Image (cartoon, grey):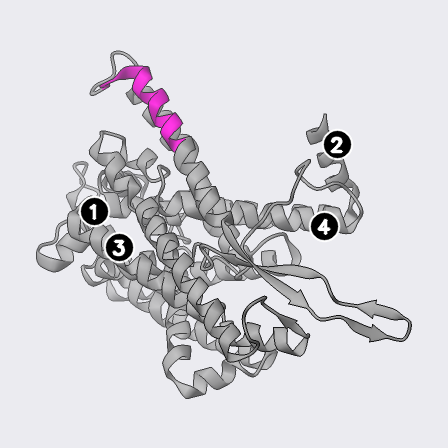
Amino acid sequence: MRFVETLRNIWTIEELRKRLMITFLLVLVYRLGCYVVLPGVSPAAIDALANFTNKTGMMQLLDMFSGGAFSQASIFALGIMPYITASIVIQLLGMVLPSFQKMQREGESGRQKLNQYTRYLTVLILLMQAPAYLANLQYQFAQASHGANVAFGFWTIAYLTVILAAGSMFIMWLGERITDRGIGNGISFIILVGIIARLPGAFFYELTSRMPGAQGSEGGLVMFLIEIVLLLAVTIGAVLLVQGTRKVPVQYAKRIVGNRQYGGARQYIPLKVNAAGVMPIIFAQAIMFIPITLAGFASEGGGFVGALTDINGFWYNLIFFVMIVAFTYFYTAITVRPTQMAEDMKHNNGFIPGVKPGKKTAEYLDTIMSRITLPGSIFLGLVAIMPAFARMFGISNGFAQFFGGTSLLIMVGVVLDTLQQVESHLMMHHYDGLMKEGKIKGRTTGSAY
């Protein structure tokens, strides 16, 4: 079988085998850490927090991004989202502050400085989010029917805050090690693992809830099969969104060097319909977590903050959709630079047929990007809010998270990106790729976080 042969080829390549094993071991460390409970937290208190998380949509979303660590009161409870939030802030500062723009142009040294500032900002965000998480723990302990009431003193909150902050920074370190010595982008891979860890339980719960005799089993197994078919259709749409490209023809002039002729061939620039990848989803989701932090992770809220914590509500999904469209344009603008592309083509004696080199080429590329980014961003936003529509039709909260939305788009994007890297190792060692025909096209704009 071709699949078995591909696995044998992967195992034959020593470098790829080591990278896969290192990735597996580091992911295993992360998953084990998700079950290491904070000191002083009783099993009864964990049950109270788990019950609350399963009943509240936003808390369920937070729990999914942390791989279940949130509901386990784990040392990894805050997950990787504080680091992503800090990365967003640093990138925004790079758009408005000249000093940050200068560091972005300094190459590797500037990137190291920005990474250091990102880490400092991550610690600052953790020092704000950790006490809010602990306040939520106290609230849930007090509400537990079995009387699991635990009062945290000042020093208890202080050292638990340090533990939570250290746990998130350790996750960030694991992600960087996966990037350097493993396969794929580490931060993206950790997010992927956290999401997939919730899939089997959500799938089984949805199946049992549709079984005959189960409470609220409307539609039965037929409805469950329809859900699976629709889920596959949405997944196919997400794959098309991630891989869709607009090919721009580029003609290179002929050059005679010695007795050889170079150039003269027509190539294509693949401009992606969704050049930003999953970044707009993560950007928007990280911003939408802010109201939760401001509300102190309270289970009840009113007014504007309360509306933004209801993931099934109209205002939450409307703002979420608009932010995704806006962030798609923003991230596309900072990653796809038509002026730089036009200059590179000019220096390499390349031109787009019918378009003058230089400024006209940059304007032409910018026009194409604007046209393909609009439908791409709208479709990205629609897929992102589809879980809200799934819940409207009676699908459970846990399974609805995979019915499109952040979970599906991140899984599709990261899986394709990781498979592309595996395929590149196979092709480099003269083995067949993962597919019999064609190539896997992952993201070309960088990481997912």
The answer to whether residue 376 is left or right of residue 303 is right
Q: Give the label on residue 140, or none.
A: 1
Residue stretch in magenta: 217-231
Q: Nearer the viewer, residue 134 or 286?
A: 286
Label 3 vs 4, first from the N-terminus: 3
Majority secondary structure in the magenta region: helix
Query: How many residues crowd mark 1 within 10 Å: few (<14), some (14–19), many (20+)?
Result: many
Q: Secondary structure at mark 2?
A: helix
Q: CA distance from mark 3 to mark 1?
A: 28 Å
Residue marked by disc 2: 5
**Residue at the limit of the structure toward the left, as seen here:** 303
Total number of numbered labels?
Answer: 4
Which numbered mark, 4 or 1, is in the foreground of this view? 4
> In the rendered image, is residue 198 in sight?
no
Residue marked by disc 3: 320
Q: Secondary structure at mark 4?
A: helix
Residue 315 image position (x, y, % from top left):
16, 53
Label 2 vs 1, first from the N-terminus: 2
